[in-house]
Amino acid sequence: MEVTVKIERFDPTSDTAPHDVSYRVEAQETDRVLDLLNQIKWYQDGTLTYRRSCTQGICGSDAMRINGRNRLACKTLVKDVGHSIDVRPLFGLSVLRDLVVDQEPFFQKYADVLPWLIVDESQTPERERLQSPAERERFDDTTKCILCAACTTACPPFWANGKFIGPASIVNAHRFIFDSRDQGAGERLRILNQRWGAWGCRVVFNCTDVCPRGIQVTDAIEQVKREILQENL
């Protein structure tokens, strides 16, 4: 069948504003949107610019707005979006070219929550730091994050104020705050106990709705808020 793919294009070297360009592509219902973008780039317009890497929904590189919703192009099938497909860059981050956005602010906020295991290195254990299945289960959901930025760029508070640390950063803080081996929870909670930390969340649920990994993002944020209150008490 023939599919029409409308893409928002922007080349900062020649364009003063974004504009739409439509392409007609032969496709199967089981093709992915990424397959269509590849066809366009390889056979119709080599200037089309977008990110992609593993093509398996693991790296998170190809997050974009497809028919008005944040999705991974490598996981979105033609049969699920129809014969007319609208593709645009993520909201809330500046566009570098076409579907490629500047992710530096996103990754800086991720780094701000100290997303690594913090332990007292002077107390080296004689063996590995063990966890029970229940302790591991406590933060299992938030280990699934692939840093695609779909949740953060679907978040109205983030659109309204770029200072908000964003859902993805809070999710990754959650992963370590509730890790029984970690000793840095207090420091992370202090970072998130700020106006544009966890309290910037307005519980809209957009983040949970668009997460390609099915993470219960809003619930994780609420758990972090409760932990902040408990810490202060």
Image (cartoon, rainbow, N blue to C red):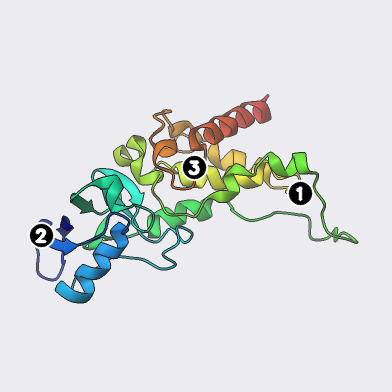
**Vertical position of residue 59 compared to residue 76: above or below:** below
The residue labelled by disc 3 is 214
Q: CA distance from mark 2 to mark 1?
A: 51 Å
Question: Crowdedness of circle 3 by 10 Å Cα count: few (<14), some, many (20+)?
Answer: some
Closer-to-camera residue (63/5): 5
Q: Relative to residue 36, is residue 22 drawn left or right?
A: left
As drawn, the label of residue 181 is 1
Closer-to-camera residue (161/69): 69
x and y percentages locating residue 91 in the rendered image: 28, 47
The residue labelled by disc 2 is 21
x and y percentages locating residue 92 in the rendered image: 30, 47
The quadrant holding residue 99 is: bottom left
Can residue 21 be seen in this snapshot? yes
Mark 3–mark 1 contact, CB under 8 Å? no
First-in-chain label (2 vs 1): 2
What is the three-letter code of the residue carrying label 1?
Arg
Q: Quadrant of the C terminus?
A: top right
**Vertical position of residue 231 compared to residue 177: above or below:** above
Q: CA distance from mark 3 to mark 1?
A: 25 Å
